[in-house]
Amino acid sequence: MKLGLKRIISLTIILVMLFAFAVPFASANTASNTARGWVRNGITVHFYLANGQMARGWQPINGNWYYFNPTTGDMHRGWLQDGTVWYYLQVGIDRRLNVITNTNIDGVMATSANGPHFDENGRPQSFDASGRWQGSPITTRLGWSIDNGTAYYYENGIAKSGWFQDPVIQNPDRNTVHQGRWYYLNPRSGAMMTGWVQVENRWYYMNPQGTLPPLGARGVMHKGWLDVDGHTYFMHDTNSQAHGTDLRGELGSMATGWQTLTDRRGGGTSMYFFQANGSMARGTITIDGRLQEFSATGAWIGETQHIRNGWQRISTPINFAEGDEVTIKYIDAWYYYQNGVMAIGWHRIGSSWFYFREDNDHRLALYPVMPVGSMMTGWAPIGGEDYFFRDDGRMVTGWHWFHTGPGERDGEWRFFRSSGALVTGWYQEGSIWYYLDPDNYGRMVTGPVFTVWNKDHTRWEDHEFRANGSWIREIARGSIDGGTGGGGTSGGGSGSTTGGGWEFITDTGWVYYTTDGSRYTGWLYDNGWYYLNSNGVMQTGWIELNGSWYWLRPNGLMVTGTVTITNGERHEFRANGTWVRRVR
């Protein structure tokens, strides 16, 4: 009886314990029934089937195979041995940051259909259609390889990592050789890195632009002067102070502190100072408790006792080449400083915009070479647009009157957008149209007749304008009245029944008939100069006469002064129409 009672008590205890464990397990299963599809918690991933049960083991999902831990249901990544067969479940996470980076491949079984494939170490791997691993085809990966837009470099099928100097490369298209270019390959994946890279407490800049190697320049370590995001840096271009096993030494690393360097614009060397973040010093800054002044290009000027602020008129020495001799002339110009830093480029001061010459302004031909940072006046082409600055430096906007002579009415109107850019061609203001001549820096056209591009920019047309520049109407080309010829002769050709003047002949072009019905040849003045060849046909474009070149507009008019030719080039012509030079 005691034995039976003990058995009863034991069974009761066991049943109570089983019930206690079963309740939370049942609750968990009940909770899982509410989930469907993918559930991600950080980098831990589960999948719930249509019946609400958590997926375990091999599962086909949306045409791909996945493997889930049989116990926890966690999705598997990386290598997996199932019996005697190896599989690889692709990795779409960043293990350093513990974040999922690519849900499209994360956990997907690698097959021959969705390759090529590389393991997490960057080594190529081969799989058949069912996902069975076929080995690492090490003989197929040599040299540079581009995978999904990322460059790798392989030796004996293994992706290199860290610093890498490529061998000599012959470019068949440009017949050039790139020798010993340095790259930095991700230490974990072998992927070529671009942009700023920190290695052993040194900063380097790997070119992020251009095409990928082997022939492209993307990823190549930068050496020398560097402009990035409005700051100027210098990346060492010598390999002094070699350290450790890195044979490059300082080569390519970002300079800091005082440096004696070749000036960017030539002419010798100067002292420069690069701050702790590598940015080159300009203006006035405190170094070791002393005020030091630097030019707009960063060259050290010297120690100073005060910080420049506001407008400063400064006389600067400039080298001028006169024949074989170089002389120094002093140029007085206005500069603007903010806390010791010289203004460069566009600056809004008060309610007006000003432009202070930048480092590359010496390339422009429309004004003399001036010191960097000097205030701009007069005409200036900047960023592909033409601007005009008053004598006090203020940028012009809206309508502006340009005096061309001593009288009050001796001048020309031009129009500038609110951005300051000069407007050329057709311009509408309200219901009124104007034509701003592109061949004369946007001069507003006035007077009875002027030949212009039509508003669709498809052909030349003759238009009539009022004295105030407002457009009146288009005039048919056949209605141009004849004029008295100058310097030409009456020549051959069939006579005209119109009594003289211009006439357009199909498949021939424009001709000019004299009153006796013969075609005019040579130079003809008719509110402008035209040239008609020996057959009496009006010429257009470039022509050469007696060793001189001329350019005639599509309407036949000879150009003078500085004009823009149809291909965008600007050329200078004398008053008699002979060509002088190409301006830009």
Image (cartoon, rainbow, N blue to C red):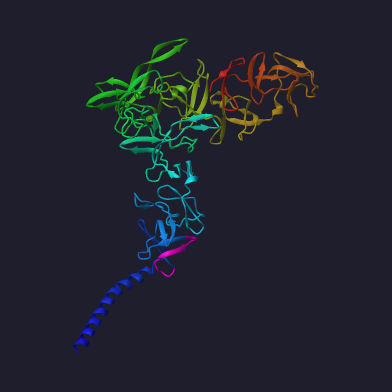
Q: In the image, residue 328 lies at what x, y percent?
A: 39, 12
Q: Quadrant of residue 579?
A: top right
Measuring from the top left, give residue 436's x and y in whole percent.
Answer: 56, 28
The answer to whether residue 229 is left or right of residue 426 is left
Q: Is residue 485 above or below residue 473?
A: above
Residue 346 seen anywhere in this rendered image of the structure: no
Quadrant position of residue 506: top right
Q: How many marks?
A: 0
Q: Main secondary structure of the magenta part?
A: loop
**Residue found at the far bottom of this picture:** 1
* Residue stretch in magenta: 50-64
Query: Would you identify the image quadrant in which residue 547 lies?
Result: top right
Residue 178: x and y in percent read 47, 31
Q: Is residue 547 left or right of residue 81?
A: right
In the picture, the quarter occupied by the N terminus is bottom left
Q: Is residue 453 magenta?
A: no
Foreground residue among 226 and 193: 193
Is residue 51 highlighted in magenta? yes
Position above or below: 263 against 72 = above
